[in-house]
Amino acid sequence: MGQLKGIKILLVDDEPNILQYLELGLTNEGYEVCRTLKKTDNASVIMLTAKDEVDDRVKGLTIGADDYMIKPFSFEELLAQIQARIRNQFPNLFGEVVVEDFRIDDRRKEIRFESRVLELSSTEYELLKFLILNQGLVLSKAMILDKVWGYDFGGEENIVEVYIRPMREKLNDREHRLIRTLRGAGYRLDIP
């Protein structure tokens, strides 16, 4: 986590106990907690809220949240979300990102798996990178389309399936143990 020195995280909550819990947990992970909000173009917002209705989530995402987690939440999941946001927003901080058997070199647009370079199109590269950086999390087709193809993509959601199939072949994942399909929910990359 040393390469993340200087990354600031603003915590806002109406429950002091939750703020203390988050501050302690994030400080122990090596983050410097920001006490004042500075105007910046590089801000990401993860909303933590007890409001779990679809309308509440839609409103939160519409007003600018990048992600939305419902209380009670797992600290480990929140930490993974923060790390994924930082990796996605500041890839140059990392140079080469290593996640288990994967090595992502964003400067070369290259992904290695088990020491071999995968032959990937630019879309396959972005899709696999998104799955790796969010490994362990369920990613809906809509979320994948938004992050990989862009919000203005006018095609069908099935394009995700079209790209997942050959990617599994390139990863020798014939039994779908690495890239799992969760019916009705999306996909999750599980690294054994």
Image (tube, rainbow, N blue to C red):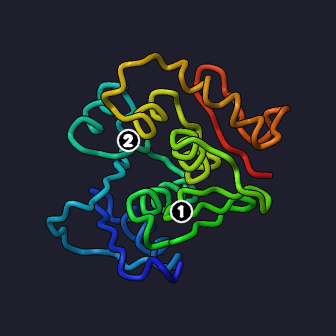
Asked where in the image residue 100 lies, by quadrant, the reply is: bottom right
Viewer-side residue, 128 vs 139? 128
Q: Is residue 158 left or right of residue 167?
A: left
Asked if 115 appears above or below 162 in the picture, the reply is: below
User: How far across and down, in percent of the image, does residue 44 sit?
Assistant: 31, 56
Q: Secondary structure at mark 2?
A: loop
User: How far across and down, in percent of the image, does residue 96 sit?
Assistant: 57, 69
Viewer-side residue, 77 vs 182? 182
Q: Is residue 178 left or right of residue 53?
A: right
Residue type marked 1:
Arg
Q: Which residue is mark 1?
A: 108
Q: Which residue is mark 2?
A: 50
Residue at image location 62% in from the left, 44% down from the top:
120
User: How far across and down, in percent of the image, does residue 36 sit?
Assistant: 19, 72
Q: Is residue 181 left or right of residue 158?
A: right
Residue at image location 34% in from the left, 75% down from the top:
33
Asked where in the image residue 23 lies, by quadrant, the reply is: bottom left
Question: In 3D space, how far apart are the residues under numbered discs 1 and 2 (Cα atoms)?
Answer: 42 Å
Residue type marked 2:
Ala
Q: How many marks?
A: 2
Label 1: few (<14), some (14–19) or many (≥20) C-alpha neighbours in 10 Å: few
Q: Is residue 31 left or right of residue 96?
A: left
Residue at image location 58% in from the left, 66% down from the top:
97
User: How far across and down, in percent of the image, does residue 68 sit?
Assistant: 39, 43
Residue at image location 57% in from the left, 64% down from the top:
105
Tag 2 or tag 1, which sits nearer the N-term? Answer: 2
